[in-house]
Image (cartoon, helix red, strand yellow):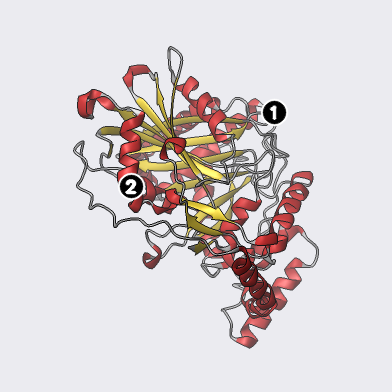
Amino acid sequence: MRQLTALDVQFLNAESRTTTGHVGGLSILDPSTAPGGTLTVDDIRELIGQRLHLAKPLRWRLLQVPLGLDHPYWIDDNEFDLEFHVREIALPAPGDEKQLAEQIARLTARPLDRGRPLWEAYVIHGLQGGNVAVYTKVHHAAIDGVSGAELLGALMDLSAEPRTIEPPERWLATKPPSQLELLAGGLKRIALHPIKTAMQLPKLLPHVDEVPGAARLPGVDLLARAGSALSKVTKQGPGRHEVDRPKLPVPETPINGPISPHRRFAYGSMPLADVKALKKAFGVTVNDVVMTLCATAMRRWLLDHDALPLDPLVTLVPLSVRTPEQAKSAGNQISMMLAPLPTNIEDPAERLAEVTKAMAAAKQRYQPLPASWLVDFSAVLPSALGGLSARAAMRYLAATSPVVNLVVSNVPGAQFPLYQAGARLLGHYPVSAITDASGGLNITVMSYNGNLDFGLVSCRELMPDLWNLIDYLHEAMEELTKLASAQNQEA
């Protein structure tokens, strides 16, 4: 039995009629390398069944504490039904990319059943070229980007011949604790909560204005400075790092506002070698290039809609703070930073330079924060108030000016071919979440076997023409490539 952290629980609390808390990925597989040249739902079920002991979150279900007095627990599901979780569907002819993306959008809009382990997988046939897709979604309460990649890795092999897996120890059904035991533990946690919170305050207060949306509340900056002085006096943390801390005004855009329950999904790839060539030509990082591509694509889309703001967009960038000791553990070990996305700059060279400068400044600003600051802030409110406060905050943020405009995330992946049930993995496209607070667009990029695979999720009502953004990302790549070529000729 494993208790969820306060941050894990926030992903449960954020769910509503319009917001789901799961993340996932779309794998495109070539079945010609699999035994018999086919890939069926039975093949995937057999694979997962043999490796459940390597992917333990797939067996876990939630155990709630009475009256919500404490965070819930993950326990092994004694009635686990693999056939329920792994399903099979097919696309009608011609089975093109946009048909597949529309099906993924429908599937990702559906919430997971909280009475069962929080994941589902769909084997999708009927794709053009004879390929097979596998779409998997897992609740964010159980995994983050890195642990999700590790979970995927447990179900993959380095060749078409599956590796030998040691059989698991004999699994025995476990009896969950009684409701009375859970209630007693919850009451004890409530009694200790004020003491733990008071001990954390000197470490947390100096950074309270870094919580997205908090800085615009009156008095927060003063509270952060007072907290910094307190932390120095009590010697609990380094205090506030007084680097240049410019305010990031978040402009109004068509992709911000209350989201609907409906989604759009689009995906595409570009060669990692081309991105690395730009990195070398301009003396920047791969992530700087990715952020510039996103800035250029968003600028083009905003111009299309006559909605380009004078200020740069503000992006939420998730960061992994998972330590080597936390490798292969489930749950969330993440932080985040806010960074400007200079869609307001017309010249592509100046846009790249501004992205590079802004990302360096953002890293300097957020570097002093404790790695666990996001988890610690999530734990300030008692569990019994967590769900209520999270949903109230979402409604408040949706009704006021945006906190951020969009999410951009970059997840590292394997740079060699992988196989699932013998079928070669051609690409893996992230399918992430959107909320009222984080904007109606999420761009997540995962590197795999020489490519950058882009997965874009949007609210259908706020950004219905999402596929245009895929085209604009490729056009942005061409623009930077021409700029690098011209720079080399001048040199």
Callout in the foreground (2, 1): 2
Circles 2 and 1: CB atoms closer than 8 Å: no
Residue at image coords 41%, 40%: 82
Quickly name the residue at label 1: 306
Q: Dividing the picture into quarters, in which one does residue 389 lie?
A: bottom right
Q: Amino acid at mark 2?
A: Gly
Image quarter hosting the C terminus? top left
Residue 491 visible somewhere in the drawing: no
Give the SS element for disc 1: loop
- Residue closest to the eye, 321 or 355: 321
Q: Amino acid at mark 1?
A: Asp
Residue 81 as seen in the image, left or right of residue 376 = left
Q: Dividing the picture into quarters, in which one does residue 383 lie?
A: bottom right
Quickly name the residue at label 2: 153
Mark 1 nearby-residue class (10 Å; few <14, some 14–19, many ≥20): few
Which badge, 2 or 1, comes first in the chain's sequence?
2
Q: Which mark is residue 397?
A: none
- Residue closest to the eye, 278 or 317: 317
Please determine whether, in this image, residue 442 is positioned above or below residue 338. Answer: above
Q: Position of residue 217 (x, y in %)?
A: 78, 60
- Residue closest to the eye, 48 or 95: 48
Q: Position of residue 303 (x, y in %)?
A: 64, 29
Residue at image coords 62%, 56%: 10
Residue 319 visible somewhere in the drawing: yes
Please determine whether, in this image, residue 367 is positioned above or below residue 477. Answer: below
Q: Report the label total.
A: 2
Mark 2 nearby-residue class (10 Å; few <14, some 14–19, many ≥20): some
Q: Position of residue 375 (x, y in %)?
A: 57, 64
Please determine whether, in this image, residue 352 is positioned above or below residue 211. Answer: above
Residue 225 as seen in the image, left or right of residue 81 = right
Q: CA distance from mark 2 to mark 1?
A: 43 Å
Q: Position of residue 117 (x, y in %)?
A: 50, 47
